Amino acid sequence: MTQEETVGDLDQSVGYVLKQVQASLHSAMDEVLRPMGLTVAQYACLELLGQHPGLSNSELARRAWVTRQSMNLVLRRLQERGMLTRPDRAAHGRALPTELTRAGQSARREASVAVRAVEQQLFSPLSQAQQRRLREDLAACAAAAIAG
Amino acid sequence: MTQEETVGDLDQSVGYVLKQVQASLHSAMDEVLRPMGLTVAQYACLELLGQHPGLSNSELARRAWVTRQSMNLVLRRLQERGMLTRPDRAAHGRALPTELTRAGQSARREASVAVRAVEQQLFSPLSQAQQRRLREDLAACAAAAIAG
DNA sequence: TGCGTCATGTCAGCAGTCTGACATAGCCTC
DNA sequence: GAGGCTATGTCAGACTGCTGACATGACGCA
């Protein structure tokens, strides 16, 4: 067994650095969202619904990489706060299409601006072209992960 | 307020794609580590100790981006399983330097090989040069996050 | 029509992590 | 030496997310 077959120096591991940046992003997002009374998961939910109105609980869960059960709690909290609406009964099947209220849209807009600033700050060491390349490279890996 | 100031289309957001890849990596790692009886956090602990013997609980926590309290539980579990040793009393200060046992080194080596394969699979869409560039770009962002 | 399969929403239980708190040990300053 | 500050280890409680399970509704097929 050679050294090449193990992970090796962690600082040379893409996965380790990836986690580091993701942790930094999550932490920074939490920092700006918390004063607005939002968790990162709640923001993700609002952002998804803002861009894709009518998504169901299960669909939101998939796109936010959490379980249906977890997303269900997120939706319930946001609904209690009047940020979104869900029909009591499904018109077709069991999926309950969710939509943002005015309050929800307002909160999403405010949070989105703050998160945008956080991302710009985090990736500021890279030029616009480098950021686009980084995004494309990561997207390629993500696509392969789903396929594989 | 223009569209440019909000996050915009999530698929065009570096942060969103970053989380996607990180989630894929975590999931894939969990999948290969679970049969070995290890969680991702436990593997991270073993890998850190393998590369840096004598790290304290607090130092391990910082490098794995968890709290001291969480890492403390990880250490306790691994110690119960005979994978590492900690002195009962500190020779200097309060930090208890931790080291892997033979069993711990063995488990770390086995897990490391598996994780290495997972990483290679995930980043296989990119060439070696692209992977190095990706790692360097991410490292630059991580360094800026710490500084800022 | 009846059955099997799949997706969805939801409930209960459990594991992992975090926050808050406290005691201890070393360092620095006065 | 006394006091303040920092870092570390640890305990207790709360919270979040996950796994497992169940019921319901739609669809495909014999």
Image (cartoon, coloured by chain):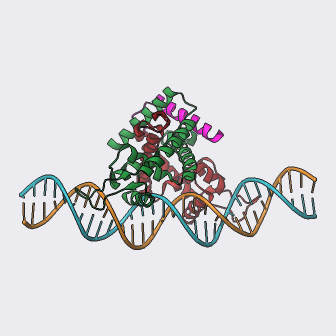
Chain colours: A red, B green, C cyan, D orange
Residue at the limit of the structure toward the front, as seen here? B102
Kindly identify the residue that appears in the image at 38 percent across and 53 percent down.
B61
Quarter the C terminus of chain A occupies? top right
Using the rendered view, name the quadrant where residue A76 is placed. Answer: bottom right
For the residue pair A140 and B59, the one nearer the viewer reads as B59
Span highlighted in magenta in the image: A123-148
Q: Answer with left or right where residue A73 lies relative to residue B88.
A: right
Q: Position of residue A17 (x, y in %)?
A: 44, 40
**Would you place residue A129 above or below residue B101 in this image?**
above
Residue B122 image-quadrant placement: top right
| Figure check: C14 above or below B54 | below
Does the segment drawn in magenta span residue A83?
Answer: no
Main SS, magenta region, reads: helix
> Visible in this render: residue B47?
yes
Q: Would you say A129 lies left or right of A125 here?
A: right
Horizontally, residue A148 falls left or right of residue A105, namely: right
Residue A141: image location, x then y, percent: 57, 36
| Front residue (pair C12, A83) | C12
Asked whether residue B148 appears in the rendered view, the answer is no
| Residue B2 image point, x, y percent | 50, 41
Residue toward you, B110 or C11: B110
Say how many tags the image has: 0
- Is A144 covered by the magenta stretch? yes
Q: Is residue A76 rendered to the left or right of residue B57?
A: right
Image x and y of residue B10, in percent:
56, 42
